[in-house]
Image (spheres, rainbow, N blue to C red):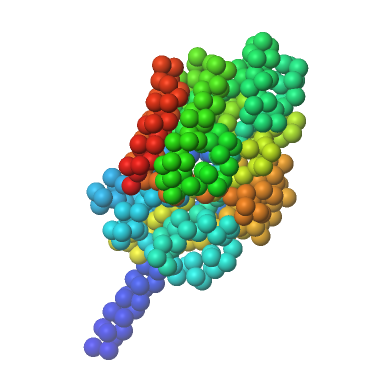
Amino acid sequence: MKSVVSVVALVAAALLGSTSVRAADVEVIHWWTSGGEQAAVSVFAREFDALGGDKWVDTAIAGGENARSATLQRILGGDPPGAAQFNPGRQYEELIAGNMLLDLTDLATKENWAGFIRPASISEACLVDGHWWCVPVNIHSWNWAWASVPAFEKAGVELPTSFDDFLSKAPKLQEAGIIPFAIGGESWQINGAFGVIQTSLLGLEKREKILKDKDLELAKAEMPAVFEKFRQFKQFSDAGSANRNWNDTTNLVVTDQAGLQVMGDWARGEFGVAGEKAGVDYACLALPIDHPTVSTGGDIFLFPKQSDPAVEAAQLKMASMMVNPQVQALFNNAKGSMPIRDDVDMSLADDCMKRGLEIIKDPANIAVDAGRWQSNDTTGQFNDLVAQFWADDAMTVEAAAEQYVTILQNAD
């Protein structure tokens, strides 16, 4: 009998041991499909696989809205992926409320995430009611313009020092056969550029009062000028913009066919893939140029709950890998974003990233991303309004501003 018990015990121990070290596949849903984005996500995949055992299984879905929708459907349908990319904000608040995400608090406490993630506002997207529900992997800012140095040289004008300065030089670019203002047709692109112009004209204090505090009287007074300024840019765009995605638009600047694009710093990855050098082939203009700011957007990864302990263990390993100092340096240098920690080796950083890191040192230069305050529905309404205003010349500035205030008034 003793021998039987011993054999059973040995078998049980072997099974328990194999469970603790069993490799797991972790399916990761994301929307990084452009050249620069693929280079960046490959860093994560390579570094995770190099840890041994577990494997990164890549599921790339073009378009952030499409990828998020697919993730939510999978989770609610009982077939959750191992990890999923989201933007920091309110996009996943229902998953937290429904207890559908892996609680990362023990890992975050052990590794002291709160001690090295900066600025502190970055943590707020994941640290909810004292628990960590996601991991921030970068800081992305919309407040950039990307300029082709050869295009401006061809037109015989200096790089712009402000939006008004750009508008005064745009005719020269046009005369030289260059698209002055490159923009794509997706509503989020158009609203993103609009938001940068809004920040430039209003400043951070008024912007926050309107977008966060919903100051309707201030919005009524200030938003007509923002719409008016935005309309001035349209005459310097091109007819092909309507059906163009963001990275193809960036490529117009990369290939010197266009002079300027207002786009977040993820565009820098496209210049990097093309072998372009900052300050020589292209310029990154931090906006507004006379008082640059950085918006605290970016990307986070959340980890839906799993029934398999091996997958859960791999999820925690992946979360830890993503904030590792070396991985942060490699990933963000490829992505065009800034690391969420300032103790990383940024010797490979180009002039644009160094500029962003310098700006973010001063809390007074930080613009909280509007997505932290707005629901997906409200963001979608603003996107649709600004895209309609851009496309429809018959829509008056006054009508657009009035609709803007109405959306703000009814925002949840």
Residue 7, quarter of picture: bottom left
Q: Quadrant of the N terminus?
A: bottom left
Instruction: Return the x and y of residue 412 as percentages of the image width and height.
Output: 33, 47
Q: Say whether residue 407 is left or right of residue 144.
A: left
At 74% from the left edge and 34% from the top edge, which residue is drawn? 279
Q: Indicate whether 130 appears above or below 274.
A: below
Q: Is residue 275 visible?
A: no
Image point (52%, 49%), residue name: 368
* Left or right of residue 70: residue 144: right
Between 17 and 390, which is closer to the camera in this rendering? Answer: 390
Instruction: State left or right for residue 89 relative to residue 269.
Output: left
Residue nearest the observer in this picture, 124 or 212 = 212
- Which residue is most to the bottom? 2
Give the image location of residue 365, x and y in percent.
62, 49
Q: In this view, does 184 lie above or below 114?
A: above
Residue 284 location in percent, x, y?
67, 35
- Residue 175 placed where, x, y %? 67, 10
